[in-house]
Image: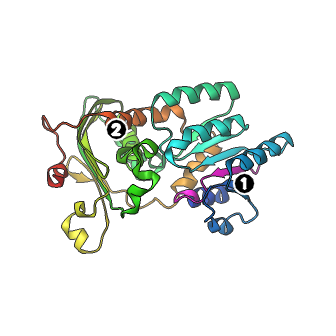
Amino acid sequence: MTKRFALIGAAGYIAPRHMAAIRDTGNVLIAALDRNDSVGIIDSYYPDAHFFTEYERFDRHIDKLRRDGEGVDYMSICSPNYLHDSHMRFALRSGADAICEKPLVLNPWNIDGLAQIEADTGRRINTILQLRVHPSIMALRERILSEARGTKHEVDLTYITSRGRWYLQSWKGDEKKSGGIATNIGVHFFDMLHFLFGALQDNRVHLSSDTRAGGYLEYERARVRWFLSLEIDDVPEGPRAAGQRTYRSITLDGEEIEFSGGFTDLHTRSYEEILAGRGFGLEDNRTAIEAVSTIRNAAPSTRGGDIHPFINKAG
């Protein structure tokens, strides 16, 4: 049966992946909202979708559909991070299940409030944790779970995705709106680490700035040194000389974890799981949200070992 979708944040970078997932799962986008009207991309997917630049008119339209017995089944949320909480509440109170981009929320206590609204409305919140449905990551998890308990791996996570001057001038550069670099570009990696290696046992921060962050995380089955950066100068010299502006490396006991392929359809795979009732919900997000909240509020310290080698290079 075809499901009816609405989408909040239609002009954002990630919205086309949601539009494609709605289409590729055989469903229909009924209405979309964004205060920015640069949304011509909708024509490639759902040119007949109603579009609104004002939240109040979108709210009225969604409510009228509901009262007429033609309400939406799902609301996809691609808005700025600090608005996710509010928009999920709106979705559930409108009689729809929510499908929310990462990060689900900025603070772990927001999860408790959302759980109460789920209970009150009978609707469900789903989230896009796309690395959990990546075939290589799923296979690695099975391998790790088959190992003897007490096994601890040594992991280095390095992710550099250089951004221009615009980044810090946008909502993404405002920690109160984005949650900072660890939340905005790192949360799905931290979720992946929890998915692979179990409960988080230790969380230390060695570096924290607007454009760089790094530290140490210890899980049941891994010790992890991590480094995130938006600075082009942090891309290693060889790739940078070749014109590469991004660099991603995750090593497990000194060997690279290869999962560079298989990303093109992860949102569609996530939607398939959600529509089958196997989506990732509120509690699946808690460990990663607690981790980034701690990182955001911690005072960096370089005492002790386990410092990522890129941190010393970054000064």
* Res 97 seen here: yes
Which residue position holds label 2?
296
Task: State whether residue 179 is above or below residue 290.
Answer: below
Image quarter of residue 21 = bottom right
- For residue 311, side relative to residue 96 (left or right): left
Disc 2 residue type (three-letter): Arg
User: Tag on residue 31?
Assistant: 1
Magenta range is 1-15
Q: Nearer the viewer, residue 236 or 85?
A: 85
C-alpha span from label 1 to label 2: 35 Å
Seen as rendered, the residue at the extreme bottom is 242
Task: State whether residue 18 is above or below residue 42.
Answer: above
Question: Percent from the top left, x then y, of residue 200?
Answer: 33, 31
- For residue 94, side relative to residue 282 (left or right): right
Mark 1 residue element: strand
Q: Nearer the viewer, residue 65 or 144?
A: 65
Of mark 1 and mark 2, the one earlier in the sequence is 1
Task: State whether residue 79 is above or below residue 23.
Answer: above
Question: Percent from the top left, x then y, of residue 4?
Answer: 74, 50
* Res 279 seen here: no
Mark 2 residue element: helix
* Residue under the image location 68 percent in, 55 percent down: 32
Question: Percent from the top left, x then y, of residue 288?
Answer: 40, 37
